[in-house]
Image (tube, rainbow, N blue to C red):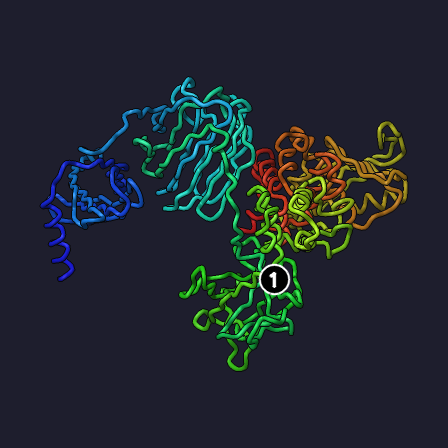
Amino acid sequence: MKKVLSIILILSMLFAVNIEAAEVVWTGYKATGRMSAHVNGIEAGDRVFVAAFNANDELVRAASAVSEGESVDVPINFVNTSYTKTFIWDKDSLAPVNTVTSTLTAEGIKDDAIFSDNQQANRIDEVVGYRTFDAVSGDYMIKMDVTLWKKGDNAIALGDSDNGVLSYGTSSAILLFNGDNFSFRDGAGNGSYAAGAVDLCPAELNKTYEIVFWGNTETDTYKIVITDGTKRYTSQVIHSRTNAEKLDTIALISNGKNTTVINESYSDFAFLGKNLEIITDSDDMVLEPVYVYEGFEGLYYGMKVDGKYVRGNNGKLTYDYNTVADASAMFIPRDMGDGSHAFVCRSSNNRMTAPETVLQNIASKAYAVNDNSQHWILEESENYSKNNLSYYIKHIDSGNYMGKALWGQNLTLRQEKDKVEVTFVPLYEESPLYIVSKTQSYNSLSDRQRSRLESVYESVAGDIFGRYGGHLEWTPRIRMDNMFREILSGQLDAAEQRALLSDFLSTANNFIYSGQASYEKVSTALPGTEGLYWTIDDGVAGTYDFWRGTMLSGVLYKLTIHTANGEVQQTVNLYVQDDGTAQTNANTFKNIIVQIPHIFRRNLKNVKVRSDSANSYNGGGGDLYIRLNWSPDANGMRSTVVHELGHIMSSNNGGWAEGGGWKNAIAQDMYTPSTYGGTNSTEDFAEFCRMYFSCYGNHDMQRGLKIIMPERYASFGRLRKNNLGGWGLWEDEYTE
């Protein structure tokens, strides 16, 4: 009751003051319930109080804010209100010095409101709010802050007013909000798209993002950079959908919704954009801020339970150490790409591993690829803060938690009610990445370059690949550690350190495998091959062209591949030379071809197997040649056939490997699949296919590949989505 009386007393004092109206600009729509009072002409420290009343003059809600400068924004929900009063309190006298009354109508707030009437419709289901500005040409940067209120089919578009009112089709640069993500599409310059949508980053509701278009009207290209407050996401180079010599219009497009431009702010029922900046001075076009490393991963941590440190080099996890002086009590969290982490003990390199049932001890075991027993989810505890990294640790599959044993100091798997709080203590001096991140050379790298280094180093990708020359110990993370230690040795100046980092980031030098990418096995049970089997006819003997006009005696068979229910999936002409080695290799081929998904081999028409000292596989068009004078095992043939099928896939899909999209991916990725793949873009694509199917169906490797070569991975995804009938990448099936 005292609180209510206090509010009434304060309001009574306020209402008594009604000096000349202040400069208050309202933005938003009454229908959304979201409005904001933008108050100008005040001083830092002044407080603005907004009160909303119903038709009975009853106070229904209020909001206030203290100005940090000459203006301030006060957001407030105006549902079921009739009018508002805005009061300004002077910071020195602590008394109200200004009062403004505004009336709400069906359209919004009147009196002190500013509305735009430049709203035009392209068609019934698309309404565009737009704003024109002084035309820019050449380099440009256009920035704004965007807050999402609802999910829907929305977009921000830039264009040339000479093309008429902006729409999806007439835009030059465009950012789409397609459901759960911000996305972009490469344009064709003639009003159409040249590629499918590519997700750039998540689009969360009630979260503000800085959106930057960074482009050039002469080259008709642009990039989109999105910052969510902690992370920055940068698109690849995008080509304009409609080429324009200049840009002079920005529009917010929202299918099926009214969209309005209000003063310097853009809003509709789905999202709000404000703080528009249009920059053409090259000196102001800076996207690379001073970098501060803030990653959770990449550092070693001590894990404390009940004030004791956990150690993990004795086959099980115990909490019985007073300090982390021993490396057995140092752990590095690894991002596993599915929302979970693995925890790796520094001294043993073992990982925290869940038992099969509750109350059994949590083990310390060697890394097991694709073993979800080593995948754990971090849940922030009630005591969590940025300075107190306190979590509950849950096993990803069982949903049970890390807990204490009934006796002793062992850690076991427990039900949720028995979970234990684990506090992570960062050991900054233990991470070469963290130390290097403070150097001038590291900060001179671009944001994208740093992001690539860290994403590989911190994730499963850093450990899963890298049989550099066939040696397992040369994983990307170990190679980076060696590089970081060289930088920190004191033997290199800043320029030499920068050169070392730049060289490491170069795709020409930074490959995963020496030779060909054949160190990993292609699985014999890939998704999509379940139950496949082959049949073959009696064949027709004759003389056939086995390689570029070389006529040899052999047999032409019809090799038919069936689904598990007996339906014919594909028929291939199989030519086999009259030679023992050729016949052995043909028999191996029959067994391995049904272990490869149909969508990947569907363009295969003819297979020709002969004995040849060339010892080579060749693929292109619809033809595969196996020319060997020896007999490889099934895995060796399967791996190389997948490589050749990559050539066939590319040639049957517009020369995908020779296209600008794949070459752009090569230029942007930090790693190349193999030294052989570095020969040219076609071999690069084929080697990526070999790696992809070495990883296919294996969670850790698949996620690692996506992290280590993200641009190739995305391009391969566009190929399968647009050209291969929507065939899903493995993570789509994994999610399902």
Query: Does residue 248 appear anywhere in the picture?
Result: yes
> In the rendered image of this protein, does residue 506 appear above or below residue 131?
below
> In the rendered image of this protein, does residue 134 appear above or below residue 616?
above
Query: As drawn, is 82 to the left or to the right of 531?
Result: left
Local secondary structure at mark 1: helix
Q: Residue at x 49, y 61 (%)?
A: 378
Query: Does residue 562 appear anywhere in the picture?
Result: no
Q: Residue at x 56, y 36 (%)?
A: 236
In the image, 691 versus 87, the foreground residue is: 87
Name the residue tied to disc 1: 430
> In the rendered image of this protein, does residue 470 appear above or below residue 685?
below
Whole-percent x, y for residue 574 in the image: 79, 37
Amino acid at circle 1? Glu
- The quadrant in which residue 342 appears is bottom right
Query: As drawn, is 547 to the left or to the right of 145?
Result: right
Whole-percent x, y for residue 386 in the image: 45, 59
Q: Residue at x 59, y 55 (%)?
A: 435
- Counting the numbered discs, the total is 1
Query: As drawn, is 407 to the left or to the right of 666?
Result: left
Whole-percent x, y for residue 258 in the image: 31, 32
Residue sticking out furthest to the bottom:
407
In the image, 233 versus 725, the foreground residue is: 233
> In the rendered image of this protein, does residue 251 appear above or below residue 372?
above
Whole-percent x, y for residue 562 in the image: 68, 43
- Would you call the spot at circle 1 few (<14 residues within 10 Å), some (14-19), or many (20 or more)? some
In which quadrant of the rendered image does the N terminus lie?
bottom left
